[in-house]
Image (tube, coloured by chain):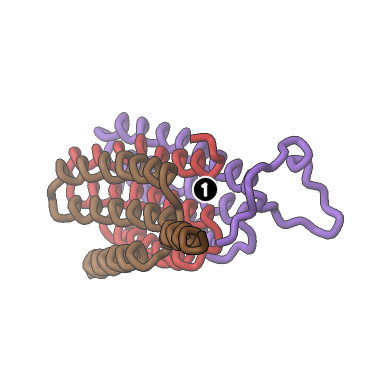
Amino acid sequence: MIFLITVLLILLLMVGAAIYAIVQKDLLFAVIASGVISLILSILFLILQAPDVALTEAAIGVALTTIIFIITIRNTVRYEDERNKKKKQKNVKKLAK
Amino acid sequence: MSIMEIIGSFLVIVGSIFLFLGALGIYRMPDLYSRLQAGTKATTLGAMSVILGVGFWEPDWFLKLLVLVVFIGYSNPLSSHAMARAMFKKKIFPWTKEGGVDAYKEVIEPTGEKQES
Amino acid sequence: MEYIIYFALSIMAVALVFVAIRFIKGPTTGDRVIALDTLTTLGVSGIVLASYLFHRFIYLDVALVYGVLGFIGVIVIARYLEGAL
């Protein structure tokens, strides 16, 4: 019974983290939330008796995804609407000329 | 119950209580650095205690669990230290009293702009 | 002995709720990263307890991978915040 309640709580937390990652404007927080999703998904795979899948999910989701997304954020912009603002400013300058 | 099982049960209960106290400290503490302290040290002790307790329950697994304890013992303080250093360079200073001394502020000159959110 | 495992799992579930509240509420980036780190440690403890509950030796490998690789994400985020990546 307690095991079932724990699994349901973990599932609820995973859905909440996914919604948080979609809604959030700051992309760094979205990357951290995706790390939480990967952790909980790995525990769920373990409970469903698939340890090899859980192993792969742990190795890829924790280390590789975070590193790749952080390097991507470093090379582009951090906030979601920053790029659109820059484009709008460029267009305004063009129109002013 | 043999003596090994009694020792293991005691370690698991103490470790789970320490994990709970660490999480409560993360929720209740007023400052970033206090939260970091509570969330890393108490949780490290709790996880080590739980893992060693399971090792006392099942003596065949003891070597692998010992390797796990060693990995937790070096990886958790390392991440905590790196995070504290990065947030200090972002000009988020620890909470002090009126006229308190922050000696680390004089050693390292914080670069980078103020964090907003 | 199973009752002790159930007690530990339930108290860790309550701890999970507190960490999740801090993860959603936390004002700075550091709070969220600390919440992720604490969730990783809680997950390692939970996986070890679950592997004893299921009596499977192979489940400990997942906990081992988390213990080895769990801190790399935090280190990378910290280096990005310092501007030294």
Residue A81, horizontal then vertical, whole percent: 43, 62
Q: Which residue is mark 1?
A: B40
Q: What colour denotes chain B?
A: purple
- Find residue A34 and report its image quarter: bottom left
Question: Is A78 left or right of A40, judged from the image as shown?
Answer: right
Residue B109, horizontal then vertical, whole percent: 72, 39
* A45 is higher (above) or lower (below) than B105: below
Residue B88, horizontal then vertical, whole percent: 64, 46
Compare residues B16 and C20 and report the one nearer the observer.
C20
Q: Three-letter amino acid code at disc 1?
A: Thr
Q: Quadrant of the N terminus of chain A?
A: bottom left
Q: What colour denotes chain A?
A: brown
* C43 is higher (above) or lower (below) than A64: below
The residue at the point 13 percent across, 48 percent down is A50
Farthest residue toward the front?
A97
The residue at the point 63 percent across, 50 percent down is B113
Query: Is residue B26 among the parts visible in the rendering?
Result: yes
Q: What colour denotes chain C?
A: red
Query: Is residue B13 among the parts visible in the rendering?
Result: no
Chain under numbered label 1: B
